[in-house]
Image (cartoon, grey):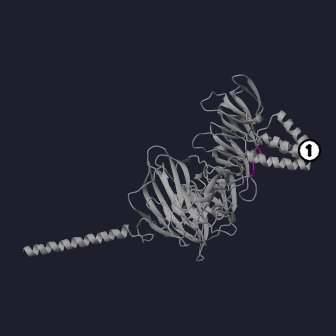
Amino acid sequence: MRFTRYLRLSVVLVMCLTVSATAQRARGRIFFNPGAVAGQGMVTLPHILQDNSGNNYRVFQGGWFQQNNNMPIYSQGAMLTVDGQNPNSNVNAATLDAKTGELVFENLQGNGCVVTRRVLLDKAGGYIRYIDIFKNTENAPKTLQVMIQSTCNYGVNSGENVSDPKKKDQSIGWVGQTGANQSIVETYAGKGSKVAPQINWQQGNNVVQATFSIALAAGKQAAVMHMHSIAPTQDAGRRFMTDLKESPILKGIEPALRRLIINFRSPQDFIGNVEVLRGDLLDVVELRGGDSFKGTLKETSFDLDTFYGPISLPVEKVICLINIGQFRPSQLLVTSDGQIIGGHLKKQTIELEMSSGQITQVPLSQISRVGYRKRAGEAEEWTFEKPMVLLRTGERIVIQMPSEAIEVITRYGKLLLKPEQVASIQFQNEDNSVHEIELTDGSRFAGLVTADAFDMKLDAGGGAQDVKFPVSTLSRLQLTAKVNEMTDTTPSIKLSNDDQMIGTLTGKLKLSTAFDTIDIDAPELRSLTHSADAGAQDVTISLWDGTTFSGQLEDPLVSCELVGGVAMKVPVALVQEYTQPQPRPSAAIVERIKKVVANDLTSSDWHVRDRARAQLLGMGPAVASVLAGIRENQPPEAQKSIDVILNELEKQRQPAKSTGDVAPPVNVDN
């Protein structure tokens, strides 16, 4: 009996040990197999990704990567910090997404937020793409300071911030030529994005940092996409970035995730929460129940009743139809030039010839979306450079340039704006009920459009059609997409209410100082500043020659003439800073300059000419406009001398180039 009990206990023990070992091996296969492929669960870290050039990238806990062969450039790539801390996880593993092939790091814990990192090695594109998703886990709004840092194994011999081709005042990335004769390429934003990073780097150093300031509402989330790659030269890296097409990159991302990305513009095949449906080889009709039919759409035109009149669109102009609403659906027609026209189709069926040859009439009430196959000659991206209206219901309609002036009431008085002076008017504002006006010269300010409706002409179907859009239906009116960019010579007024005027102060100013009242010609001002803790009229003024006064302006308003030709009065109490890089010298100095040019710069004695050049250069960059104005009336030799002086004055005027860009906070309410 005793022997039998011992035998049974031994068998049980062996079975337990066998089961335990089997379980451990099973756990190893699930969690710690670095050779796992997409769809087979989690992988241990570091996980190795390999591109088509034989470069190996080891991805570590937290999602950062390291290159480890072929003269590795990256020692640390895409290191992430949020509010100065690295989001962390206690699990040394990541998941391979079976559908996308991305390496996914979930539930990285940050300060009041949770971070998800999605990492994809795009072998065809030659870059590693990151999508970092941030969710505010607190019950109050929170601003996250997000920094992405990369370090290379070699010092940076030269580098440059790559300017956005569509917005010259912001950068989309950075390229650095390293000591390994290859360039590190960091892409942080798409072209024309409203969100751009602050980029910091130092000559000879091996670290580059990109910072985003993201304001998140309670419980909301946002995503930042960035790419990291290597190029043979700095010029090749710059071309990679400026030639990059955002649409193919974003197209492969799930729509729900794509909507969260704030630093790349949504591609043209995405409208609000609905994706534009397109066929591949065939047209496609998608039903509300999820079924879809493929074939050839046989419609010859689309006749639409809208609240602003009937519209007839030729079939070759339409690329997609989207049904919206449940009980009495309306239709959005998307055109090949990017218009979105909404209304009710007169015909209640869509005719489709299936690949079998059978023709069927699909009831409009059963349809979710209709998409045409891509046609030859279609533009890859919509430009939206024509005048257009955007309605609150989602429509986007091209119009002809209005002929009537637009009356706007502002805190600077009532303004009559010519349509050619206006870039856009934002009617739908989530923060307040005022309208936001942007002019073509770059000025922007708040106001109220007085008109109840706009009489316009549209060309949606071949002929100009008179329509009327009530202001209450408008989300945005865009009259031109081209806005002048600020340069080093642009005069501007920054106001404490976030308005900005691009223009110069005009007229006469009277400044009461501690010792006297000073009369000042406004065009002679180099700057005017008004600190927040000073009195409403207390300012500090700097003149063209460096003279500085502090005192109180007698008039509570200053006159301003914008570059686009609009004249207005600006309250002194709102002026935060006025800068005029090219102030006009005083009348006495202008006469002196003319005499020096006429008498000395044209002298036959080279000693006299040299003294004249030195004298003019000593007056500083402010005299450049005077010299340029009188140049054409001078003899050839004097013109050559003026050109040399103007070049030297330009060098004096140019400030030292900065290696950083300023990125304002980004408000996100997704």
271 w.r.t. 233: above or below? above
Q: In this rendering, is residue 304 above or below 524?
A: below
Q: Residue furthest left?
A: 1
User: SS for tag 1?
Assistant: loop
Q: Nearer the viewer, residue 6 or 290?
A: 6
Q: Alpha-carbon neighbours of circle 1 within 10 Å: few (<14), some, or many (≥20)?
A: some
Quadrant in the picture for the N terminus: bottom left
Residue 141 at x, y percent in the picture: 48, 44
Residue 558: which quarter of the image? Answer: top right
Q: Main secondary structure of the magenta part?
A: loop
Q: How many numbered discs sit on the rendered protein?
A: 1
Q: Does residue 571 lie above or below 199 as drawn?
A: above
- In front of the other: 462 or 200: 200
Residue 226 lies, in percent from the top left, at 55, 59
Q: Quadrant of residue 265?
A: bottom right
- Residue 64 magenta: no
Q: Is residue 484 visible?
A: yes
Left of 373 or right of it: where is 97? left
**Residue 616: x percent and y percent?**
82, 41
Toward the bottom, the furthest residue is 356
Q: Position of residue 623 (x, y in %)?
A: 80, 41
Q: Residue furthest top?
A: 515
Badge 1 is on which residue?
603
Q: Residue at x 30, y 69 (%)?
A: 24
Q: Which residues are magenta?
A: 400-404
Task: Reply yes or no: does residue 401 show up in magenta.
Answer: yes
- Can residue 369 be seen? no
Q: Amino acid at mark 1?
A: Ser
